[in-house]
Image (cartoon, rainbow, N blue to C red):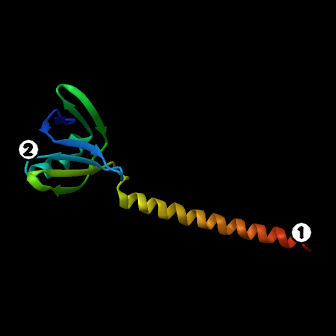
Amino acid sequence: MKITFNDATELTIQSASIRADGGLLIKTISATEEELRSMFQDEFKTKKMTVTERESTVATYENYTNMDAIVKYTAGITGVILYKVGETPAEKTEALASENAELKKTVDMLQECILEMSELVYQ
């Protein structure tokens, strides 16, 4: 299995999959940690990545340009975790917290309106 980058370079990989948190995990044994860091920090290179196996396209991943981590597994396997810009778990959590705060303000305002209307009805 291999992955072809946007700049037409290739890397032999063991697997590529989307994780539960939306991150792309690519596992390989054919490059050092430094080589992987250099490859996957290049935003142009990772703009579009195509995974092929036996000359068949298995998957195409676009816009996974934010390298989050390099993970070492047993048997010399190294994994790279990539996210789309603005979609890391921390960024998603921050966006949800902001949305939650806005919703809380709206609920508070609606409660005040209901109380005011109740006061008018019961006068």
Q: Is residue 4 above or below residue 110?
A: above
Residue 43 horizontal side relative to residue 38, left or right? right
Residue shown at 12% from the left, 38% from the top:
12
Q: Residue at x 18, y 56 (%)?
A: 70
* Residue identifier under label 2: 30
Residue at image location 59% in from the left, 62% down from the top: 103
State the SS at label 2.
loop
Q: Which residue is mark 1?
A: 121
The image position of residue 58, as x and y in percent, is: 26, 32
| Quadrant of res 55 | top left
Badge 1 amino acid: Val
Tell me, yes or no, whether the two marked residues, 2 and 1, touch with CB atoms within 8 Å: no
On the image, the x and y values in percent for residue 77 come to 12, 50
- Callout 2: few (<14), some (14-19), or many (20+) C-alpha neighbours within 10 Å? some
Q: Position of residue 52 (x, y in %)?
A: 20, 31
Quadrant in which residue 17 is drawn:
top left
Q: Which mark is residue 49?
A: none
Of the 4 image quadrants, the one containing the C terminus is bottom right
Q: Compare residues 23 and 34 and report the one nearer the observer.
A: 23
What kind of residue is marked 2?
A: Ser
